[in-house]
Image (spheres, helix red, strand yellow):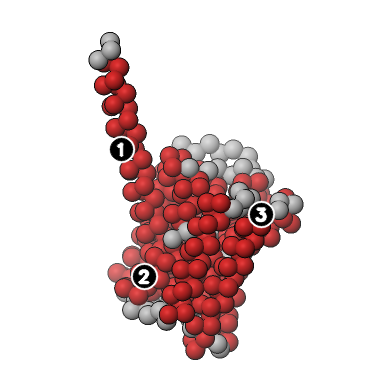
Amino acid sequence: MQKILPMTMKSAKVNLAGSRFLSYLACLLAILLWSGWIVLSRHGAQTTLSAIDLSFVRFTTALVCSIPLWFVYNWRRIPIHQLLLVSWSAGVLYTTFCFAGMVTAKAATAGVLINGLLPVFGAVIGYLWNRTKISTLTGVCILSILLADAMLIGGDWQKLGNPQGIMAILLFACASLFFSFYAVAVKKWNVRLMDIVVWIPIINFITILPFWLGSDTGIPAASLTEVLLQAIFQGVVVTLFAGFLIAHTIKTLGPMTSTMFMASVPGITALLGYIVLQEPLSSIEAISVVICMAALMINSRYGMRTFRTKNNFLK
């Protein structure tokens, strides 16, 4: 008995270490997929596909792939206003604004502005809605993020200092605002992962369909390869697969460790944008990316837990 017990404990330790290794691996893969989504969306926005086309392709594919989940989903009653607001804020409002901004701004700009502004808007929404106050450290991190955003815009002013560029900045800010509302709302209303996976494709497909039918679509002019690439990555890899990956990592590693990993998205996006899209970064832009990442990581590790990053609903 004395020999069996240590062996059992050793086996348990090995299994635990293996499980944590797989969790870290899943978290890194989720980061790469999220960063890759920004880069692929930036690429798609430069083709004949419009922002409405990209959203239509995304939610049509997600709807088709989520149909098998309907048979195991518990169709519980959820107030319709909660379903609509959560689905739209993480759906057509978020994605269409992102895609429209990516027509002008490069991937690094999208990565820093969209992700960096999440804690800014999250703090504001949390205070207005729940009267939740942030810590002094979180306030300093938010000011650092705003400084990084200003540096990024200034470093690329030649491209952003025009009506189209300013519009792109506003579009990214609006997208971040909508997703921040979504992150706060899913916690306040206790929206579950399966609710999100099932309802977001349904509601957003119904919403985007009339807009797509009334738009001047660029899908017929796009190559089949491009449409399939966007459909698979947008509708399956990001909407469904990445969501489950993040859910697993938060469950096994905890929300704090997971959000610290996700804070690296702006930097990885900038790197992928440089490698895949040949979008160079000036020294000022590179510094702004580093400042944004550092502020996000410090806030997720030491800041008051009044706001989580975009994956808080999976906690």
Q: Would you name the residue on which mark 3 appears? A: 135
Q: Would you name the residue on which mark 2 appears? A: 271
In this picture, is 175 found above or below 310?
below
Q: Earlier in the sequence, mark 1 or mark 2?
A: 1
Task: From the image, state whether disc 3 or disc 2 is nearer to you.
Answer: 3
Instruction: Tell me whether the residue at label 3 lies in contact with that at label 2, contact meaning CB atoms closer than 8 angstroms.
Output: no
Cα–Cα span, label 1 and label 2: 30 Å
Label 3: state its secondary structure.
loop
Cα–Cα span, label 3 and label 2: 32 Å
In this picture, is 237 found above or below 70?
below
Type of the residue with mark 2? Leu
**Residue 167 placement (x, y as % from top left):** 58, 80
- In the image, taking residue 142 as reference, residue 25 lies left or right, namely left
Q: Check disc 1: other Cα within 10 Å, few if <14, some if 14-19, many if 20+.
A: few
Q: Check disc 2: other Cα within 10 Å, few if <14, some if 14-19, many if 20+.
A: many
- Residue at point 47%, 70% (across, down): 289
- Residue at point 43%, 39% (across, down): 252
What numbered label is drawn on residue 18? 1
Label 2: state its secondary structure.
helix
Q: Earlier in the sequence, mark 3 or mark 1?
A: 1
Type of the residue with mark 3? Ser
- In the image, taking residue 118 as reference, residue 257 lies left or right, namely left
- In the image, taking residue 151 as reference, residue 273 lies left or right, namely left
Type of the residue with mark 1? Gly
Res. 281 in view: yes
**Residue 243 placement (x, y as % from top left):** 44, 50
